[in-house]
Amino acid sequence: MGSCGYGGGAHFSRSRVLVLLFCLLGLISLSCAARLSVSRQKLEVQKHLNRLNKPAVKSIESPDGDIIDCVHMSHQPAFDHPYLKDHKIQMRPSYHPEGRVFDDSKASTESKERKNPVTQLWHVNDKCPEGTVPIRRTKEDDVLRASSVKRYGRKKHRAIPQPRSADPDLINESGHQHAIAYVEGDKYYGAKATINVWEPKIQQPNEFSLSQLWILGGSFGQDLNSIEAGWQVSPDLYGDNNTRLFTYWTSDAYQATGCYNLLCSGFIQINSEIAMGASISPVSGFRNSQYDISILVWKDPKEGHWWMQFGNDYVLGYWPSFLFSYLADSASMIEWGGEVVNSEPDGRHTSTQMGSGRFPEEGFGKASYFRNIQVVDSSNNLKAPKGIGTFTEKSNCYDVQTGNNGDWGRYFYYGGPGRNENCP
């Protein structure tokens, strides 16, 4: 037969029904039907790209191939949310947490003074004007790598470490493995950490490795609330093996709400210098220079929104409190640490690395660390966490070791190589 084109829109769905009828009647070739199915997917992907990629005031090409669009602050994806149509952007938090704020511009005595602060790769080419926010442009290939358009930019269900789960098999159901430190049993209003930045090797494109903090509320069932921030290497999400700054949120245990970065309505960005999902540069080297990033997430006691700060200078924006149920009040658990996906390629444990790919006992310059970990209490004070627990599903694959000293406060080393002779 001739062309199997379609007119799009409502006509397209009618065409699809006719095509299926014709296929059943043997009046049209299966290859033609397949082409229509591909065309339908392309249309769906294009619609999604049009929703995500807002008109840019200016676009900047990054050396890693990313395009960073400078989008007017009031046109960012957050404002597609029906509850945010008339939202007045809060340009600064009403209150910052008080207490000991570690000066991250000065390195610890162990890491000596660093000349190069950690920044983002796209900065070498240009910057976004005031009043705009930098957004990593989503490309067609990014969406096509996802299992579906609907699942693009979302974590899989059960991606959360449950330190005291009664059923360890439940944790491993999704193949996610962790090495974390955590606190629970109180009301928490934020968390802070300085996180060593590495570029772990990923074995399979559908696996990832990340290092982050989790701010959690609710049960670990269907109603879990989570705010997450840190760095990740995720070939599936970004199409490369670069280490990237990321955030995530969900109010229903990763089911229908939330996403990475700005890939759905939710997080409201106010900063024109830092792009969610953009590559971090430089990264640490084995027995070489060490680099780390500081992340603070806290609940504004006046407005109730959850704010995020990157380093000492960049208040990035906030998650409006209405997005959440439990976190509209406070968090019941804080976690810090690493997570990888183990898809068990060839029926064996993955060799995807966590952190630096080295075990904690190797220490500074070799193993990855979180230092100066703190929580925000009900008086909006930053404090050292009390009663830290640790958790890992398979310590022969990835492990965690905590410590405490004057310079690094509460800290831990974590990570590992994955597959090895003790982790087959």
Image: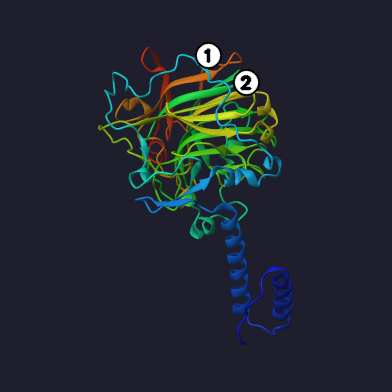
The x, y position of residue 284, in whole percent, is: 31, 35
Identity of the amino acid at label 2? Pro
The x, y position of residue 50, in whole percent, is: 58, 57
Circle nearer the viewer, 2 or 1: 2
Spatial CA span between label 2 and label 1: 22 Å
Q: Closer to the camera, 42 or 359?
A: 42
Q: Residue at x 53, y 40 (%)?
A: 176
Q: Closer to the camera, 400 or 213?
A: 213
Left-right relation of 362 to 229: left
Identity of the amino acid at label 1? Lys
**Pointer 2 with pointer 1, Cβ within 8 A:** no
Q: Residue at x 48, y 41 (%)?
A: 276
Q: Is residue 13 above or below residue 255?
A: below
Res. 27 image quadrant: bottom right
The x, y position of residue 317, in whole percent, is: 54, 34
Residue 70 visible in the displayed image? yes
User: Element under label 2?
Assistant: loop
Q: Which quarter of the figure is the C terminus placed in?
A: top left
User: Element under label 1?
Assistant: loop
Q: Which residue is mark 1?
A: 386
Q: Residues within 10 Å of mark 2 (few under 14, many from 20)?
A: some
Q: Which residue is mark 2?
A: 301
Left-right relation of 412 to 164: left
Q: How is the image coloured?
A: rainbow
Q: Closer to the camera, 41 or 207?
A: 41
Q: Closer to the camera, 182 or 144?
A: 144
The x, y position of residue 397, in whole percent, is: 42, 35
Q: Is residue 78 above or below residue 372?
A: below
Q: Is residue 180 above or below residue 43?
A: above
